[in-house]
Amino acid sequence: DVAAGTYLQGYMYACGREEGKSGG
C-alpha cells in the first residue's frame, strides 16, 4: 500500500528528527 508506506516513512522521519538522527 503506497499510502501506508508513505505514512510509515513520514512517521519514522519525524521520529528520527526528534532523536536527532537522519530518519529512522
Image (spheres, rainbow, N blue to C red):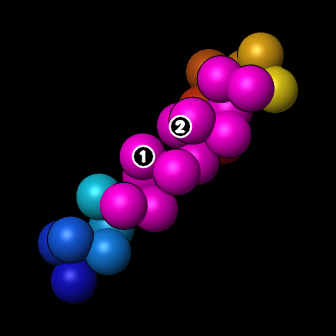
Q: Is residue 22 above or below residue 14?
A: above
Q: In the image, which residues are magenta?
A: 7-18
Decide: few, some or many residues near mark 1? Use Cα within 10 Å; few <14, some 14-19, many ≥20: some
Q: Is residue 22 above or below residue 23?
A: above
Give whichever of 22, 17 is nearer the camera: 17
Q: Residue furthest left?
A: 2
Magenta stretch: includes residue 15: yes
Decide: few, some or many residues near mark 2? Use Cα within 10 Å; few <14, some 14-19, many ≥20: some
Question: Where does the image place residue 21, in percent across and percent down from the top left?
Answer: 73, 21
Question: Where does the image place residue 8, in percent across and percent down from the top left?
Answer: 46, 62
The residue positioned 42% from the left and 46% from the top of the image is 10
Q: Is residue 1 above or below residue 2?
A: below
Overall secondary structure of the magenta section: helix
Quadrant containing the N terminus in the rendered view: bottom left
Magenta stretch: includes residue 21: no
| Label ID, residue 10 | 1
Amino acid type, mark 1: Gly
